[in-house]
Image (cartoon, rainbow, N blue to C red):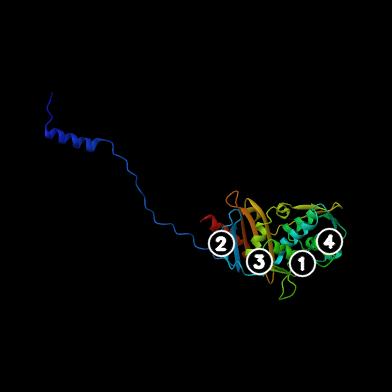
Amino acid sequence: MLKKTPLILALGALAFFFFSPAQTTETQVIRAPTEPPALPQIEARAALAQDFLTGEILFKKNEKTALPLASITKIIALLAVLDKISLDEEIEISKSAVLAPEPSSLRIGEHFEVGDLVAMAMVESSNDAITALYERLNTDGQFLEIMRLKAEILGANSMNFINATGLDETETTTGGYGSAEDLLKVTRFSLDSPIWQFGDVREIVSKEGIKHILKPTNELGPELTPLIGAKTGFTDLAGGNLLVIVEYPIGHPLGIVVLGSSEKGRFEDVKKILGWIKNL
């Protein structure tokens, strides 16, 4: 047997070191922290975005400031209506409803189910439809107080209503006031209301068989998927308002509202906020 000399032992050790499989060790890669995307620059005076599932606030700007609501006022009006009457109740269209400000396709004496008028109010922000519903329930002159109490029950204490449409009453007085924060409170706690289920309606038919094609006021409809619900608003005093409910991520209803933008700017503002949230 060959006797191993110290030199042979040393050479063997070196060979083992160079040719044996390297032992793996955990390597930590140190990355510089990623800078969050810059806050979106929006035109709106106030805005708020919230994950309705977790309650997390994702974006805010002057969210507690009460501002003119314009036709977003109709959300509270419709919630108050459906607390009192059913969707299948029949309502006759009066002359005063047809004469409500802004053009309408409704005709005096036509009969609709409440659900049809809710669809008109939500999809194309019909003042005639909301006036017909208001007349049905304001027989004792208390409907605006009913609206105020409905908002209060939902935690929206900043809200006040001069009329049910949200239209400006004068050059200095608008039809309804409220904050972005309170609007999302109302929206979050009314997600199971039927009012949010009429966004896809594009045609209603009166009992007399007259068809009415609805023209959506929400220009972002095709871009926001899946879209749960939306409501627009615009008057001289309010500027452009927009409230949308989308799912992002799937299973998480996300509410975004902007108040005091411009007629076109409200849509761009919501797109900017949603895009910013998706890049967080």
Q: Which residue is mark 2?
A: 59
Q: Which residue is mark 1?
A: 145
Marks 2/1 in contact by CB < 8 Å: the verdict is no
What kind of residue is marked 1? Glu
Q: Earlier in the sequence, mark 4 or mark 3?
A: 4
What kind of residue is marked 3? Gly
SS state under label 2? strand
Near mark 3 (Cα within 10 A), the count class, few <14, some 14-19 or many ≥20, is many
Q: Which mark is residue 157?
A: none
Q: Earlier in the sequence, mark 4 or mark 2?
A: 2
Q: Residue furthest top?
A: 1
Q: Earlier in the sequence, mark 1 or mark 4?
A: 4
Measure the C-alpha gap from mark 2 to mark 3: 19 Å
Q: Earlier in the sequence, mark 2 or mark 3?
A: 2
Measure the C-alpha gap from mark 1 to mark 4: 15 Å
Q: Earlier in the sequence, mark 3 or mark 1?
A: 1
Q: Is residue 94 left or right of residue 174?
A: right
Q: Position of residue 11 (x, y in %)?
A: 16, 35
Q: Which residue is mark 3?
A: 240
Q: Which mark is residue 136?
A: 4
Q: Nearer the viewer's eye, disc 1 or disc 4?
A: 1
Residue at the spot x=66%, y=70% of the render? 67
Q: Position of residue 153 (x, y in %)?
A: 70, 62
